[in-house]
Image (spheres, grey):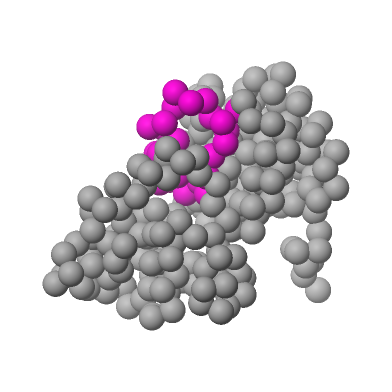
């Protein structure tokens, strides 16, 4: 019988090239009863090799890495349709790259200077499909979504999305987490995740952001 994901520890993989921060993160994760560190790497290539053969729920992803950067690694992981989520670790001066990482499929980001308890709560939120985004980036997403929204007369749905799937996308565009969407639509969070999986497949995308942008451009959903 498959393991009940809600009843087991969250499996976290850390990608970070700072030895000091890497040590602190892995030590903290090992101390938290609801999660475990299943691996770590200081290089993207090593991380990719290990993540694709391990059971991983959440990847804590640094953006500035030697070789392939964190944005490219995030995109590669999402394109492989691995059953995991990416939470970016960054500094305040990487706003543009954070935006690129979230468009590539990351569910959110944390500034490296936040406390470990914030990291803990963010990993738990992301593991459930929730989004963790700094206010500044959230504002940029809203502005970006507004700029690509089609006129009301141009409503098209070439992907054949169901009314439920369109409802999920519309709520995602408003910044709701999977759990919050489930509450609004009266469905379980796992059902929301199933709808998202179908949406990604039908639309040929890898992330919430890509799906929302395409739907807005075609007028399939409105802000």
The answer to whether 187 is drawn above or below residue 120 in the figure is below
Q: Residue 51's spot in the image, x, y percent?
A: 65, 44
The answer to whether 36 is drawn above or below residue 25 in the figure is below
Q: Residue 217's spot in the image, x, y percent?
A: 23, 60
Q: Quadrant of the N terminus?
A: bottom right
Residue at x 78% of width, y 38% of height:
29
The range drawn in magenta is: 89-112
Q: Residue 64's spot in the image, x, y percent?
A: 51, 25
Quarter of the image where one finds residue 87? top right
The answer to whether 36 is drawn above or below residue 194 in the figure is above
In this rendering, position of residue 38 left or right of residue 99: right
The answer to whether 86 is drawn above or below residue 216 in the figure is above
Residue 113 seen by the camera: yes
Q: Nearer the viewer, residue 1 or 145?
A: 145
Residue at x 51% of width, y 77% of height:
185
Residue 47 seen by the camera: no
In this rendering, position of residue 12 left or right of residue 83: right
Q: Residue 122's spot in the image, x, y percent?
A: 64, 45
Q: Is 101 a magenta residue?
A: yes
């Amino acid at each position: 019988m498959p393991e009940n994901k809600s009843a087991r520890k969250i499996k976290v993989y850390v990608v970070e090239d700072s030895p000091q921060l890497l040590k602190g993160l892995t030590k903290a994760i090992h101390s938290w009863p609801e999660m475990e560190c299943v691996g770590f790497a200081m290089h993207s290539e090593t991380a990719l090799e290990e993540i694709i053969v391990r059971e991983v729920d959440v990847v804590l992803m640094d953006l500035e890495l030697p070789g392939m950067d964190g944005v490219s690694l995030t995109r590669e992981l999402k394109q492989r349709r691995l059953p995991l989520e990416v939470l970016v670790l960054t500094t305040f001066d990487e706003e543009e790259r954070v935006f690129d990482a979230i468009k590539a499929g990351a569910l959110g980001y944390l500034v490296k200077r936040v406390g470990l308890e914030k990291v803990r709560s963010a990993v738990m939120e992301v593991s459930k499909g929730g989004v963790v985004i700094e206010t500044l980036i959230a504002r940029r997403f809203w502005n970006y979504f507004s700029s690509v929204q089609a006129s009301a007369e141009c409503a098209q749905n070439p992907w054949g999305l169901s009314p439920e799937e369109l409802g999920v996308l519309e709520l995602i565009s408003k910044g709701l987490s999977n759990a919050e969407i489930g509450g609004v639509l009266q469905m379980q969070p796992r059902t929301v995740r199933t709808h998202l999986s179908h949406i990604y497949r039908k639309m040929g995308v890898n992330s919430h952001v890509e799906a929302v942008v395409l739907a807005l451009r075609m007028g399939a959903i409105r802000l």
